[in-house]
Structures are given as structure tokens and as C-alpha cells.
Image (cartoon, rainbow, N blue to C red):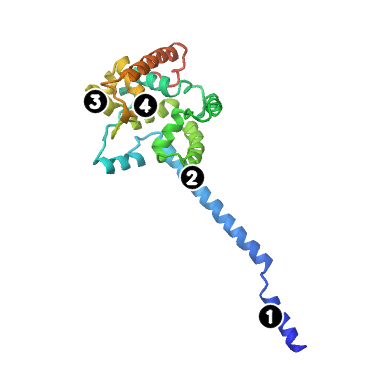
Amino acid sequence: MAKRATSRKKTSGTRRDPSRLRRGIRHVVRRVWQALAVSLGLILVWVALYAIVPVPVTPYMISQSWRHGGVDRDWVPMEQISPDLQRAVVAAEDANFCLHWGFDMGAIRDAIADGGTRGASTISQQTVKNAFLWQGRSWVRKALEAAITPVVELIWSKRRVLEVYLNLAEFDTGVFGAEAAAQHYFGVAAADLTPVQGARLAAILPSPQRRSASNPGDATRRRAGQILDGAATIHADGRDDCFAN
């Protein structure tokens, strides 16, 4: 009988204390929330900083620099980028850029209806990806892009979004931004691009490695012609008001 009582006493001593377990769970949850709060704060500071200073470098630029031994890039303000290129890129990539808050729900519905065979990313989403994230199609990156895009739309002006996009977009292997692209293809400053040149630069996006703006094939020429018409349309109906001078 004595041995049996001792055995019961040892067994009860090894049981977990429910209150201690609950404290442990609360501690972990608190730490998780603290980490999330710190991450959110850092993202807000990062986004706010890029609202006023040029983006110094991006993860993709770094990878391209390692791969090709350097990149060609020269940041210029919006005032030094041809309005014809501005309108051409918006017409080509996101005609409703001035009308949405970062996501074009109509384009997303159309993409879903087409079985996901067409893209629905807005210029705002592409800017977030280029400035803050990495290339690729992982769900993690897409989730971060979806989370950061509304923050950017809240803090930045539409003009700033387009300015950053035009300075970060890759127009040829290792050639980033409107100024470097204008010099690379046409030997002129971004401010001096003609409507046709601007349309051709927009036409090679988003696959510039397979296309040339200075020596376009038939498909690129046709695409540039469509973009010229689209740029004229958004200028006429006011869909360039949010970024036009």
C-alpha cells in the first residue's frame, strides 16, 4: 500500500501546470505581435523614406549586377522624363492607373476569367515589387506585395509611384530606368524622347531581353502603334491627370 501511494504521488508531480502552459502561450503570442508591430513600423518608415528620396538600389539590381558585372542606371526626377514616355508606359501597363487604389479589380476579374493566362498587376504593384521585394512568383512575395501596395498608395502620390517605376524598370539586360534606356537605345536624354520612341520603350516591357526599342521587330512595331493610340486616348479623356505636369 505504501509503494502504491508513492507511485501516485510521483505521477501527480509530473503533470503539467495548466496555468504555466497558458502563460507560456501568452508569452509566445505577445512576442509574435511585437515582432509584427516592429516589422510594420519598419515597413512604414521604409515606404515613407522612399516617398522623398531616390531608391538607391533594389534586390533585382544587385542580382543583375552580380550576374553581369554591373548595371547601367541613372535616376532622374519626373520633370526630366518625357511626358510621352510617361503616358506610353501607363497606356501599355495600366491604363486605369489614375482610377484605382493600387489594384485594378476589373483586370483581376478578367485575368481570373481567362484562367490566369494574362497578368493583372498594376504599376503600383510592380513598383512595390521592384522597390521593396524580389522577382519571382512565390505566394510569400505576392502576399507581401498585396500588403505593401495599399501602404504605398496611401503615402505616395500617383506621380511619385510612376516616377519610381520609370526609374526602376529594366529596359534591357542591366539597363534600369528611363534615362539609361533613352541613352542606351536612342542616344538622347529621357526628357527628349519623342512619342514614337516613348511608345517603343513601353512596347518592350515587360520582356525587354527579348525585344529591342531601337531595332524593333514587326510585333514590337505593332505594339508601339497600339500604345501610341492608347496614350492619346488617356490624354484626351483625362486618365493622365494624376501624373501629368
In this view, the residue farthest toward the bottom is 2
Q: Considering only vertical position in the picture, is 84 above or below 102?
A: above
Question: Does the rendering let one see residue 177?
Answer: no
**Residues under labels 2 and 3: Cα distance?**
39 Å
Among numbered discs 1 and 3, the one appearing first in the sequence:
1
- Front of the two marks 3 and 4: 4
Q: Position of residue 244 (x, y in %)?
A: 40, 18
Foreground of the two, 154 or 224: 224
Question: Which residue in the protein does label 1 denote?
Answer: 10
Tell me which corner region of the image, top left, top right, bottom left or bottom right, holds residue 172.
Answer: top left
Q: Secondary structure at mark 4?
A: loop
Q: Secondary structure at mark 2?
A: helix
Q: Which mark is residue 19?
A: none
Whether residues under marks 3 and 4 lie with C-beta atoms below 8 angstroms apart, the answer is no
Q: Considering only vertical position in the picture, is 100 above or below 235?
A: below
Q: Secondary structure at mark 1?
A: helix
**Residues under labels 1 and 3: Cα distance?**
81 Å
Amino acid of disc 3 = Gln
Residue at position x 38%, y 34% in the image:
52
Q: Secondary structure at mark 3?
A: helix
Question: Which residue in the protein does label 4 denote?
Answer: 205
**Residues under labels 3 and 4: Cα distance?**
17 Å
**Residues under labels 2 and 4: Cα distance?**
33 Å
Question: Which residue in the protein does label 2 denote?
Answer: 41
